[in-house]
Image (tube, grey):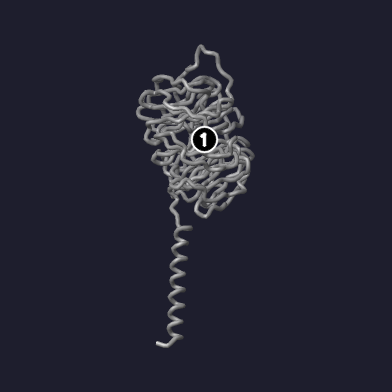
Amino acid sequence: MNTSIILRRLRTFVAGAALVALAGCAGTDTLRGSGDLGLIIERATGSIQIIETTGRTQLATVKGLGDLSHASAVYSRDGRFAYLFGRDGGLTKVDMLKAKIVKRVMQSGNSIGGAISQDGRLIAVSNYKPGGVKVFDAGTLDLVADIPAIDADGNRSKVVGLVDAPGQRFVFSLYDSGEIWMADFSAGGAPALRKFPDIGTLPYDGLITPDGRYYAAGLFGEDGIALLDLWNVDAGVKRILDGYGRGEQPLPVYKMPHLEGWASAGGALFLPAVGRHEILVVEKESWRELGRIPVHGQPVFAVARPDGRQVWVNFAHPRNDVVQVIDTQSRKVIHSMKPGKAILHMEFTPRGEQVFVSIRDADKVDVYDTRTFDRLTTLDARKPSGIFLTARANRIGL
């Protein structure tokens, strides 16, 4: 074999080896499942950090998301696309794998959250200004329906507590009018609306139980919760926990509790009480109060670890530098920590071995082992608030 043939074959071999090596690098760098991804909202800069939970690392930053001072997110069924709801009325679709904005629409003047339908085809946004709900095609972000929140007297209301429910429905509350509405999209086309007036004064937030059966609206204007059984909507709305603060001096409320952060564990529900230094414990089936757990301050979120054994609680200003952990079996606080000022959100990994905690004033997110309470790592983030993992994609109401 002459020298030229040997050189040609050597060049071919080296080029082939280089291609194999390059392909291997591309697979490592660009091929990724979406199941362990998540995002951290950086409220001060209108950006998000895309993270992965296996190695607890930051992968990318996406900018240009507008006012994220009270932002939240939901995910497509496959976890690839995040839909972010900004306070400025912006609805933004983000590709989590490519770390880029797919489309952004300004759909109102002031929005407060949103939801994705049971089949993943519709995105609903709740609006303060103008009051109402707008529904969009999840693929194109084209407007599908506009539902003004106008009561029987012709008054327009802010919309809060928007959740998705089984049966291709969205349920939400009218803050100013004291109503719960249900929009049913199961027939396609324009939604069928069902309205429940006179539920109580100033419903400030809403939640849906993990099985999708019950929708509950917390009331700011009075002690109590309005409950709607979505399996038996003809029965109407009933009041539970009525007057839980009766006879006691109300405290000033520095930040509304977030009922979407309530905890369901075992046979009980753990809810933050408005203006009180307590967690209310409620029996699931009867909705009667089982007890109260004294805590450090006014709770904002009470979030259950996925196995239901622990509930992690953060607090409103000025006591917002503390996180407490409640054992749901003993119903006692078993651990307290001080990660830093302005703890705004907590998010568990899907199986609950870790929890991500955003600490706004320290510009960081701490990750803790939920068994030992050891801090595993710290991620830098600019004024972080909400943390949303793609595991939410296939959970009702999240």
Residue in front for this viewpoint, 134 or 14: 14
All told, the count of numbered labels is 1
Relative to residue 170, is residue 63 drawn left or right? Answer: right
The percent coordinates of residue 172 (x first, y second) are 51, 34
Q: Quadrant of residue 306?
A: top left
Q: Residue at x 59, y 31 (%)?
A: 157
Q: Residue furthest bottom?
A: 2
Q: Is residue 235 visible?
A: no
Q: Is residue 135 visible?
A: yes
Relative to residue 325, is residue 320 drawn left or right? Answer: right
Residue in front for this viewpoint, 241 or 290: 290
Q: Residue at x 39, y 21 (%)?
A: 288
Q: Residue furthest front?
A: 3
Residue in front for this viewpoint, 218 or 337: 337
Instruction: Give the quadrant of the N terminus.
Output: bottom left
Q: Amino acid at mark 1?
A: His
Density class for disc 1 (Cα within 10 Å; few <14, some 14-19, many ≥20) is many
The percent coordinates of residue 168 (x first, y second) are 44, 42
Per the image, label 1 sits on a secondary structure element best described as strand
Relative to 107, is 314 above or below? above
The percent coordinates of residue 316 (x first, y second) are 55, 27
Residue where numbered disc 1 is placed:
345
Q: Quadrant of residue 227?
A: top left
The percent coordinates of residue 85 (x first, y second) are 56, 42
Q: Residue furthest top?
A: 247
